[in-house]
Amino acid sequence: MARYRVGLATRERILAATLAVLSEQGLESTTLKSITDRAGVGAGSFYNLFASKEEAVWEILSNAIAAVDPDPQALGSETSTDLVNAFVQFVTGDDAVLSRIYLQLASTAPTDDDIAARMARAQQRRVDRFHAALSREHPDLDDGVVALHAELLVAALTGLTVRQGYDPSFDFARHARLLDTDPSRTAGRMEQG
Amino acid sequence: MARYRVGLATRERILAATLAVLSEQGLESTTLKSITDRAGVGAGSFYNLFASKEEAVWEILSNAIAAVDPDPQALGSETSTDLVNAFVQFVTGDDAVLSRIYLQLASTAPTDDDIAARMARAQQRRVDRFHAALSREHPDLDDGVVALHAELLVAALTGLTVRQGYDPSFDFARHARLLDTDPSRTAGRMEQG
DNA sequence: GCTAATATGGAACGATCACTCCATTTTGGG
DNA sequence: CCCAAAATGGAGTGATCGTTCCATATTAGC
């Protein structure tokens, strides 16, 4: 759509405005008007560059999620602790509000199949990362056990994010770092149950 | 507001319709029109009985949350396993959709102080229950450790609920029942960290 | 510097929403 | 049976939303 230099520059300004509004006002208050006002741009310009409001929002969120990757090349050097710390960074770092928006989308997913599919993919990727790291740290354990423990770990981190959402004084990092990154005991419970 | 028999009956019909629409269509699609159409009632009748749409929705949600209580009189006889099972029932039982709506509200809470306060109270009550049960089961452990473990347990359950939201094939009950209800190892990690 | 492609702002559109207003009917205590 | 209070349906209100349309201005290849 954008072919002239001015157009590409405007596109960047709009994306920056979208990030700013999302961070400061949350998903619900991120209206087209709030974005275009912030960017100092008319609605016509916006729709000359984006197919829909959703497109701009997704572009920001995708970038935010990808940005918190401790090992972008997937070299297999990251530990489960690295991954927990990356998650803590995602939730408490500079763009913390985006993690809440991400969560908000996850909760509305059941209503929207498209969103549900995107969330499922992102979640699976994250669980796979934990799974791989845990396998490296505990090569002796059964793979099914490790996979399950990875699910439980990511779920706990997600749940702590929810908790943090309505109680800003909650010490997310402390709780996150106290989670169990050793699947051994989960293994014990599986045999028992 | 309602003083005649017909009015009270209409009130019940509206609440039943609200529950039905919430369950079948989710929070976002629960408009005033969808409620009144389902109840076979005009908007005027609705506002003769309820102050706002929110009032009806909250009445349904409060009931749903209260209904999944294993020990309503708080006699202190419930175990942590009872509480986990009650949570499983809340998420996978007949009114399962309500747990997703509950979660959806939790995620939008940061935007709305009133909702945030309600959610914080409900969450605290749940954590306290787990805390009390765990303390009964492990009277020897430090209270701070048990409190922290209760937080982690409820967070994990919440996270698994999110997971289930966008992947209906997820086996919530299995994962929930494999969570660690023994704070001992958490205690170990606290000393270490 | 000509010109077609692109960019721009903002009025206008149509849909949706929660809620109000009110003429009319129904209720039930005395 | 009376009649004030309560109940009722639904048209109407005003606000907000994403999106479209279009006249005008700017860009950049030639």
Image: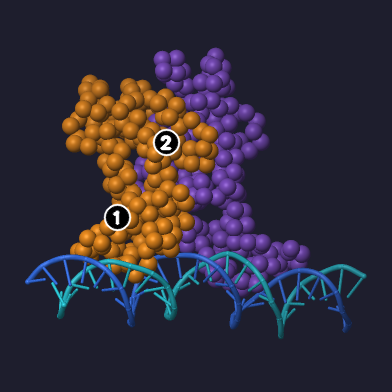
Chain colours: A orange, B purple, C cyan, D blue
Comparing A55 with B88, the one in front is A55
Q: Tell me which residue sits at (57%, 40%) in the image.
A: B120
Does B190 appear above or below A49?
above
- Residue C4 falls in image quadrant: bottom left
Q: Residue D22 occupies which quadrant of the picture?
A: bottom left
- Residue placed at 29% from the left, 55% from the top? A12
Q: Badge 1, how many Cα within 10 Å: few under 14, some, many 20+?
A: few
Query: Which residue is found at the position 42% from the left and 24% from the top?
Result: A178
Taking the image as shown, residue A91 lies to the left or right of residue B58, namely left
Question: Which residue was labeled with disc 2?
Answer: A92
Picture coordinates of residue B105, whole percent (x, y): 51, 49
Judging from the image, mark 1 belongs to the subunit labelled: A
Give the side of residue B142 with respect to residue B188, left or right: right
**How far from the left and from the top, in percent, is residue A45?**
32, 67
Can residue A191 be seen by looking at this rendering? no
The span from disc 1 to disc 2 (Cα, nearest Å) is: 25 Å
Give coordinates of residue B26: x percent, y percent: 47, 57
Residue wearing tag 1: A12
Report the amino acid beneath label 1.
Glu
Q: Image quadrant of residue B43?
A: bottom right
